[in-house]
Amino acid sequence: MVISLIFDRQPPIKDGYPTKDITVLIAARNEANTIGNTLKYVANQDYTGRIRVFVIDNGSTDNTEANAYLEGKNLNLDVTVIREEQPGKFNALNTGLKYTDTDLVITLDADTLLHKSAIIYLVSRIESSPKEVCAVAGSVLVRNSRDNIKTKIQEWNYFLGIASIKRMQGLYQGTLVAQGAYSIYRTANVIEVGGWPDAIGEDIVLTWNLLKKGWKTYFEPLAVAFTDVPTNWHSFARQRSRWARND
């Protein structure tokens, strides 16, 4: 890994200011307290192309739907809220995929916040890549790293254990996970493999299904998003157990 990173040179960006229409899918379940902030960071992007956002309310029992609609209106952001009662993030994303009419689609977790240039870097990277590159993973870092010692440890885990490995894999155009928290995909390729599968770790299985087709996946370290990590060992163990299981 160290040798790969030493010799790694990011391919040049052909167009640093793309304006292609894109769709952002946000699967949300009981995210009334976070969805507004997530949408605010989408609205503050320096991307000049059209951004259409679908918030897929996956059977929430709180005010996720109402808050997403109201915040989108207040931000003058193109937000459509879709109700999907069938549980499962894969169901929510596949429902959003049915409404997607753009060549590129981004997935974003409802509690993940984007750096102001996150989208422009992600779109620039996939648009500058060969056509066989069907997905590009963004760089997800820790936002609440100052909460306690547990979150500080996870900050370095995300930076060294996840981002560095993704960059090494991207050097060989074989990033093994285009994570659902923040990644971009060519819509036609996702449709061709049947969308997100019914699996624990649906983003992992989707990426592997894309790779099985002979397509390639990449990583863009400058397309940065921030997420909150578990603050106690119980939540941490549950998260990592979920990550470790897939069909």
Image (spheres, rainbow, N blue to C red):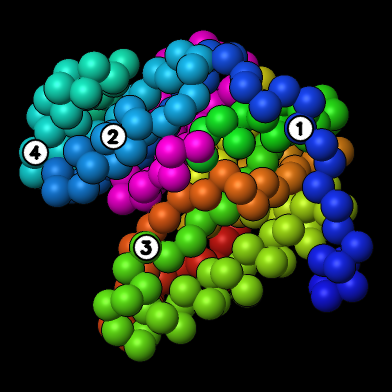
Numbered disc in front, either 1 or 2: 1
Please name the residue shown 12% across and 33% down the image. Answer: 67
> Do residues under tags 3 and 1 come within 8 Å of each other at their CB atoms?
no
Please name the residue shown 27% across and 77% down the image. Answer: 147
Local SS, label 1: loop
Mark nearer the N terminus (4 vs 1): 1
Q: Position of residue 174 (x, y in %)?
A: 80, 51
Q: Position of residue 244 (x, y in %)?
A: 55, 71
**What residue is shown with label 1?**
13
Please name the residue shown 84% across and 41% down the image. Answer: 11
Q: Quadrant of the C terminus?
A: bottom right
The relative height of residue 188 versus residue 9 in the rendered view (above or below) is above
Local SS, label 3: loop
The relative height of residue 151 versus residue 16 in the rendered view (above or below) is below
**What residue is shown with label 3?**
143
Mark nearer the N terminus (1 vs 2): 1
Mark nearer the N terminus (3 vs 2): 2
Mark nearer the N terminus (4 vs 2): 2
Q: Mark 3: which amino acid?
A: Arg
**What residue is shown with label 4?**
63
Few, some or many residues within 10 Å of mark 2 (<14, 14–19, 20+) = many
**What residue is shown with label 2?**
39
Q: Mark 2: which amino acid?
A: Leu
Local SS, label 4: loop
Mark nearer the N terminus (3 vs 1): 1
- In magenta, the rendered stretch is 89-117
Few, some or many residues within 10 Å of mark 1 (<14, 14–19, 20+) = some
